[in-house]
Amino acid sequence: MKDLTQGPMTPLIIGMAAPVAAGMIFQTLYLLVDLYFVAALGDDSVAGVGAGGTLMFMIMALTQILGVSAVAMISQAVGRKDQPQANLIFNQSLVVSAIFAVVTLLGGFLLADVYLASIASDAGAVREGVIFLHWFLPGMALQFPMMAMASSLRATGLVKPGMVVQVLTVVLNTILAPILIAGWGPGPALGVMGAGLASSISVLVGVILLTLYFIKMEKYVSFDTALWRPQLAIWKRMLNIGLPAGGEMVLLFVYFSAVYWLIQDFGAAAQAGFSIGGRIMQSIFMPTMAIAFALGPIAGQNYGAGQFGRVRETCYKGIMLSSVVMVVVTLLMQWKSDLLVGFFSEEAEVIAVGSVFLQLISLNFVAQGIVFACSGIFQGLGNTRPAMLSSSVRILVFLPFAAYLKYQPGFTINMVWYVSILSVAAQAVVSFLLVRREFRLRLDAAPQPAGLT
């Protein structure tokens, strides 16, 4: 366990974020390697895997319920020096993770065909997307126990073990991708099936490694089968904190699904361009997401310890660091976005769609960084409803305007990106105002934290 209630704030944030960012950099490398080999299979494969990949937002929604609630509840327990409560919450999160894993497998296999048929550009993209999902679903299900263990470690201030495991699994995934997708070496050329299989194998190895770490190394929170009997009161508190965060990811799922629907009439090349641009964008976001991941446990431990001034400092310095990172990547996208997209496709239309998407959407990167930072603070405070509210504002701005434009004469794909810029800017303003409101309600109104809500 690491005490996050002491020491200068900026070095503390950077020290927490750096290992997370290192793991995410390796994740970025895998995403790019995976995208490179999938792109070589053709537009239908890229569009199908991209459309199927939107289901990851649903998985992330469920993992957010688990991860966010674990970080908030365990970090606040650590701040209060209540180790038995922290350990109880950890073990209950394992039970919940098993339930979510079963739901994911059943729902994915039953509904994948219907979902992809509703958003993919043509039958070829649907076919490729279904194949990918069927082999990726076991990896999606295994994300839940991995999230339960990694989030519990992060809540106690330990990020390096999770980062090391993540790096190892990403390295394995990167090795398996060309073998199973393209048939390098002794491997069969399985195409999109290989992409899903490589990911599932790698996540399985990650779960095994984290399990071994808890058995051999971790002492503050540990496996205890006596604590696995369902504790409905704790589950209720977990859902109270986690459901809004999960809802936030569901809204992102709605957003990306809507984009695929909005641009489906422009063909598979357009969806492939957006898919490549979206993957690059996700990779770019990883450093500022690492900062947001650091803010949650830091804010949580300080809130639990009653050090409210440090909670505010965590927020404002987190926003500053996120903004600096986003300014740098915005300049990069304005300068060389076509080069980045061109690395994954030689088709002029795909490159044009992807590079223009990145150039335009990068105009709201700073706003997106503010949103990430505020979400981390909401998690630390144990109230994620404001984050869901700000995401709802984004959807309520984006969907009506974009859907209206879709049916107007002269509708172009760039109009979708302009509306997206407007919606994220609105979300950032709302997020910041809601953080200020939470501070007034939680930090100004009471001399001591009232506990989890």
Image (cartoon, rainbow, N blue to C red):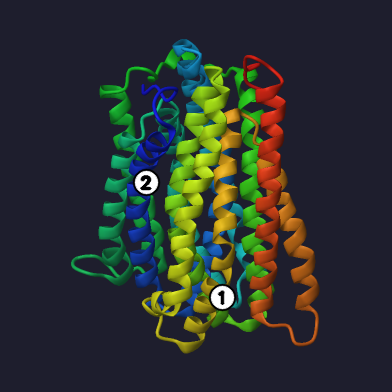
Is 99 rendered above or below residue 374?
Answer: above
Q: Position of residue 283 (x, y in %)?
A: 43, 59
Depicted 81 relative to depicted 8: above or below: above
216 or 331: nearer the eye? Answer: 331
235 relative to 130 in the view: left or right: right
Disc sitting over residue 271 in the figure: 1
Q: Residue at x 46, y 18 (%)?
A: 78
Q: Is residue 92 visible?
A: no
Q: Which of the image's four quarters has the C terminus?
A: top right
Q: On the image, which quarter does residue 237 sit in?
A: top right
The residue tagged with tag 1: helix, strand or loop?
A: helix
x, y percent for residue 285: 47, 56
Q: In the shown orientation, is residue 270 left or right of residue 435?
A: left
Q: Quadrant of residue 367?
A: bottom right
Please report whichever mark, 2 or 1, sits nearer to the chain's N-terminal start. 2
Residue displayed at 32% across by 54% down:
26
Which residue occupies 31% across, 22% down?
Answer: 218
Which dot marks residue 203? 2
Q: Secondary structure at mark 2?
A: helix
What is the count of numbered marks? 2
Residue 272 shows in the view? yes
| Comparing labels 2 and 1, the label whose residue is closer to the camera | 1
Query: Could you say where residue 189 lies in the image, as x and y percent from the top left?
Result: 30, 70
- Could you tell me the amino acid type at mark 1? Gln
Q: Is residue 15 left or right of residue 85?
A: left
Would you say 445 lies left or right of 380 here?
right
